[in-house]
């Protein structure tokens, strides 16, 4: 399985539109080679470079196993991010360049949990159901901190 964004390659800059300096909407994502017996997908977007440790920007699960997640969409049930909201909130690092990982999981079932759950609960619930996983990564630094 493979996840990518048609707007940036792995390790490249995430376009401003998808950050707090822009419209702060999720970028489009393309998914290839989804395992045949996949019942749902789960996606976690996080920043491991945050000063207080890994910071979660988006948790979404029970995504239909299709080959694309559309820009500015709610593709499944949304969990709570570290901004305490059940939405995508893009890169907004306090300083310097940060990496943002888009981690995708193919699951053999739908998750039987309500919306608004935290990342840890979603990860715990999907552990026994992961068929395959993949990730991509983009980088970003806020306008005020660019050289």
Image (cartoon, grey):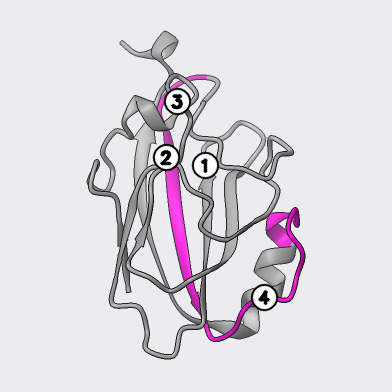
Q: Residue at x 37, y 89 (%)?
A: 36
Disc 2 or 3, which lies upstream in sequence? 3
Rounded to the nearest angstrom, the CA distance separating label 1 from label 2 is 6 Å
| Label 1 crowd (10 A; few <14 / some 14-19 / many >=20) | many
Q: Nearer the viewer, residue 85 or 74?
A: 74
Disc 1 or 3, which lies upstream in sequence? 3
Q: Which residue is mark 3?
A: 23
Callout 1 secondary element: strand
Whether residue 48 is in magenta: the answer is no
Disc 4 or 2, which lies upstream in sequence? 2
Q: Give, as a single range, the part of the protein colored magenta.
A: 95-120
Q: Nearer the viewer, residue 18 or 134?
A: 18
Rounded to the nearest angstrom, the CA distance separating label 4 from label 2 is 28 Å
Rounded to the nearest angstrom, the CA distance separating label 3 from label 4 is 30 Å
| Label 4 crowd (10 A; few <14 / some 14-19 / many >=20) | some
Q: Which residue is mark 1?
A: 47
Callout 3 secondary element: loop
Determine the image quadrant of residue 52: top right
Residue 141, image x, y percentages:
40, 23
Q: Are marks 4 and 1 in contact (CB under 8 Å)?
A: no
Residue 75, image x, y percentages:
51, 57
Q: Which residue is mark 2?
A: 99
| Label 2 crowd (10 A; few <14 / some 14-19 / many >=20) | many
Q: Are marks 3 and 4 in contact (CB under 8 Å)?
A: no
Q: Residue at x 28, y 43 (%)?
A: 11
Q: Which residue is mark 4?
A: 111
Is the residue 18 above or below the residue 111 in the image?
A: above
Q: Are marks 2 and 3 in contact (CB under 8 Å)?
A: no
Rounded to the nearest angstrom, the CA distance separating label 4 from label 1 is 24 Å
Q: Are marks 1 and 2 in contact (CB under 8 Å)?
A: yes
Q: Is residue 128 left or right of residue 121?
A: left
């Amino acid at each position: 399985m493979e996840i990518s964004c048609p707007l940036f390659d792995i390790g490249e800059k995430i376009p401003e539109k998808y950050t707090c300096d822009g419209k702060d909407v999720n970028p489009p994502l393309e998914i290839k080679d989804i395992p045949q017996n996949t019942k749902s997908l789960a996606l976690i977007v996080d920043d491991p470079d945050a000063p207080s440790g890994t910071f979660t920007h988006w948790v979404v699960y029970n995504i239909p196993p299709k080959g694309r997640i559309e820009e500015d969409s709610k593709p499944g049930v949304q969990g709570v991010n570290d901004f305490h909201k059940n939405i995508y909130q893009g890169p907004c690092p306090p300083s310097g360049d940060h990496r943002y990982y888009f981690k995708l999981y193919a699951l053999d079932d739908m998750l039987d949990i309500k919306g608004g759950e935290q990342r840890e609960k979603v990860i715990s619930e999907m552990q026994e159901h992961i068929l395959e996983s993949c990730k991509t990564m983009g980088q970003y630094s806020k306008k005020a901190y660019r050289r």
